[in-house]
Amino acid sequence: MNTTDRFYNAACHIWEQYYSHPFIKGMGDGSLEISKFRYFMLQDYLYLFEYAKVFAFGVTKAHDHEILRIFSKSIDDILNEEMEIHKSYMARIGISERDILNVKPALNNISYTSYMLAESERGGIADITAAILACSWSYAKIGKYLAEDKKNTEHEFFGQWIDGYAGEVFQSNNIMLMNLMNRLTENISEAEYKRLETIFVNCSKYELEFWNMAWEGEPDNA
Ligand SMILES: Cc1ncc(CN)c(N)n1
């Protein structure tokens, strides 16, 4: 069994909760309150800047040109492709540049990105890829899952989000990262594999917490 199949088996009890999550179901059937989506978009926008820095660790630690290209292309795609989804929604919802500057990252958001960055600083290319993969792969799967029902993608508001993550650019970048993960781990020991699996499972848990945070919104004591 390859590494990504093993990762999936280790995290599927968490991933199954994504599909039935009220926030994700709400985007699918169009019932999600825009105020919840607004909060998610702003937090996710901040998240993406930190996530891009995880790839930047990959750039500095890359030991061959192909890996260097994969990580640097990913940074460009996050900042200039994925963030276009956010910018477009911000324009639609009426979120200004000033609103964005006033947003503080929520504790969950800080914890997740700090964890990814810490593992990336400590580890090598395989650790960095394991830290990135739950993020990339889970959104690719959620986008595809929601896009299975054509009327979800046709929804006049949430359709754009679903299309963005179900679309060719995001899907093919994710496959590139999955292939990289498998290639990097072809000859590793079981102990090394377990270290990477822990990172992947922890990031999968952080993903679930991020959806919970988006659903529950800002706590009263924030
Ligand atoms: C929290 C989170 N996780 C994953 C993704 C997909 N890059 C995202 N935009 N935000």
Image (cartoon, rainbow, N blue to C red):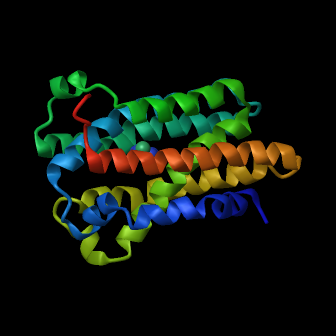
Q: Is residue 204 left or right of residue 63?
A: left
* Closer to the camera in the image, 22 or 66: 22
Q: Please name the residue shown 75% across and 34% down the image.
A: 64
At which x and y percent is residue 11? Answer: 61, 58
At which x and y percent is residue 67? Answer: 69, 38
- The residue furthest front is 221
Q: Please name the residue shown 64% across and 30% down the image.
A: 120
Q: Is residue 54 visible?
A: no
Q: Measured along the vertical axis of the image, is residue 174 above or below residue 68?
A: below
Q: Please name the residue shown 59% across and 64% down the image.
A: 12
Residue 31 in which image quadrant: bottom left
Q: Measured along the vertical axis of the image, is residue 38 above or below residue 28?
A: above
- The residue furthest left is 94
Image quarter (top left, top right, bottom left or bottom right) of the C terminus:
top left
Image quarter (top left, top right, bottom left or bottom right) of the N terminus:
bottom right
Question: How many numbered marks have been drawn onto this rendered protein structure?
Answer: 0
Residue 98 in which image quadrant: top left
Q: Measured along the vertical axis of the image, is residue 137 above or below residue 46?
A: below
At which x and y percent is residue 167? Answer: 40, 61
At which x and y percent is residue 4? Answer: 69, 58
* Closer to the camera in the image, 216 or 103: 216
Q: Quadrant of ligand 1?
A: top left
* Closer to the camera in the image, 175 or 207: 207
Q: Is residue 201 visible?
A: yes
Q: Please name the residue shown 45% across and 60% down the image.
A: 168
